[in-house]
Image (spheres, rainbow, N blue to C red):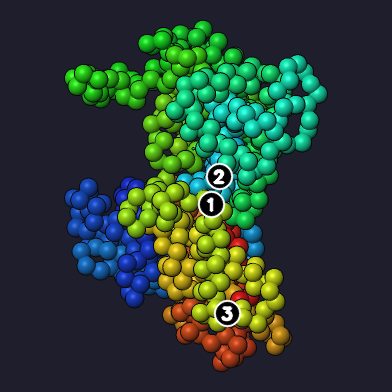
Amino acid sequence: MTDLKAALGEAVQAAFAAEGVDAALARVTTSDRPDLADFQSNGALAAAKALKANPRELATRVGDRLAADPRLASVEVAGPGFINLKVADDALAARAAEVAADADHAGASTVDRPRKVLIDFAGPNVAKPMHVGHLRSSIIGESLKRIFRFRGDTVTGDAHFGDWGFQMGLLIVAVGDEGKADAFFAEGDGPFPDVSPVSLDDLERLYPLAAGKAKEDPAYRDRARKATAELQSGRAGYRALWAQFVAVSRTALEREFGALGVTFDLWNGESDADPVMAEMLAHLSDTGLLVEDDGAQVVHVARPGETRKKKLADGSTVEAPSPPPLLVVSSEGSAMYGTTDLATILDRRKSLDPDLILYVVDERQAEHFQQVFRAAVLAGYAEEGALEHLGFGTMNGADGKPFKTRAGGVLKLHDLISMATEKADQRLAEAELGADMPADEHADIAHKVAIAALKFADLSNARTTSYVFDLDRFTSFEGKTGPYLLYQVVRIKSLLRKAADQGAAVGPIIIAELAERDLALTLDAFDQAVTDAYERRMPHAIAEHAYRLAQSFSKFYAACPVLVAPDEATKGSRLALSKAALDQLAIALRLLGIESPERM
Ligand code: ARG
């Protein structure tokens, strides 16, 4: 399905082509003077320069060719050679009807050639509570997962659980020292208990304790290292204990993700890359990619001439490769963060063989991914361009630094959701919404308002920018917020319920009023917003559209009475427009991962 804007774009290109103008110059954009036109093309200006012609004359000739197009009500040349296009009411009505009839996609197109896409997002860790950094990855990743799926790709969302490495050794030592898990410390193949000797609270308490001790006490650190090595080389009791850590953490995390409306198709862990590790190391060394560097083993990833100044310990500077080499095996013999990511690419290639892997991870890890991706391409584990790091900015406090709690600690996701829900409750009371509802429905509404507030506040910013955490603003029912959008959804639902009660039904769409035109044009623009969000991996294009649609509907509703429309045909048409707006708004919100209540 093509949107009206694209269809008219093709007509304009054909008219320009007939005048000998390159299609690339003949673009159509939304008019920046909606009072004068719906769309415009400024192509004549650039083209006239190339053809050494008069731009206004060229524009007039193109305009004459377009004048016969039945979809256009008027074609006018303005200023030095802008072509202003006004769409015919009938063409708008036909397009709005098309959108209204498209229950699944509300006028948005799908890709011609679907791909297999893996999205690596959230990246929670065993025993560590999630904080606001994980929040952004979860919110953006969930939205991208939905957008890619909506466009027709086969998408796998993978939580990439941080379940491997030194932190596991730390936990094993700490749990052992508390004497709670003696059975797991026996040598041999077991059997070992299959219940957890520790609770989530134990894990969350023990992990920071152990990490702190390891920093101060070298002997403790060595014990944790040894435990890590034994775990990784397969000591059965440690594996059994580790499996309990993973299970306890995952259950708790899934509950939190559930509250946030975030789900995964895979809960693969960093540990899942372990079985291909040996093969990978052998391969890297056979191909000569793995080289010795100061006792460690690295893969060089900088290309000739890619250097930057590096300060040495003595204060002098040297030209060093940039990006720096990927550290694969440390001088102590352990695999590193980058090693795991590289092996995970190999593992994914062997299992799902995705065409594209998207990593939704903090922008501060940009260099890490640059190193890993280059190494993966050099090793032949991925095609150039098949790995993308989608970085994002931080959620900051009022001081412009990554958000901290009042006590100065990192804010746990769980506490953030409770805070937002409490605030949502307060906002609902202020707006006198939901007061007479049963308690469980009210709680459900407050939760949905809270999640909408957090998600929309995040997704309405371009992914790459940082934003300031301001719960008061996020939860307001006014302005560009999630709660405002939910309120609009509920308002349309209630209108449609009333119409149904009165026995009024939707009818053919007729476009007559200005507000109806605007609503139809906005409905038409959804395809572009989705395509844009998809191609640039930027959900905010859809957030922006949702807001525009809600506003457009609001204006329409104020200007064009629906239930008391002047005649039955107008009433049927306006109901159909309202329903189309609701369906598209609900889909847009769904793509952002936002659920709306039935009423408020
Ligand atoms: N677990 C990591 C963290 O908490 C994030 C993992 C990101 N994904 C990846 N493939 N490296 O910081």
Q: Is residue 598 visible?
A: no
**Front-lying residue, 290 or 397:** 397
Q: Is residue 406 visible?
A: yes
What residue type is disc 1 on? Answer: Leu
What residue type is disc 2 on? Answer: Pro
Q: Residues within 10 Å of mark 3 (few under 14, many from 20)?
A: some
Residue linked to disc 1: 413
Residue plotted at (47% across, 21% down): 218
**Front-lying residue, 208 or 295:** 208
Q: Disc number at residue 288?
A: none
Q: Position of residue 273 (x, y in %)?
A: 60, 25
Mark 2 secondary-structure assignment: loop
Question: Looking at the image, do the residues carrying marks 3 and 2 touch, with CB atoms under 8 Å apart?
Answer: no
- The mark that comes first in sequence, 3 or 2, is 2
Residue linked to disc 2: 129
Mark 3 secondary-structure assignment: loop
Residue plotted at (55% across, 78% down): 429
Q: Is residue 361 above or below residue 27?
A: above
Mark 1 secondary-structure assignment: helix
Residue with the most extreme right position: 191
Q: Disc number at residue 433?
A: 3
Q: Position of residue 191 (x, y in %)?
A: 81, 23
**Front-lying residue, 125 or 196:** 196
Q: Quadrant of the C terminus?
A: bottom right
- The mark that comes first in sequence, 1 or 2, is 2
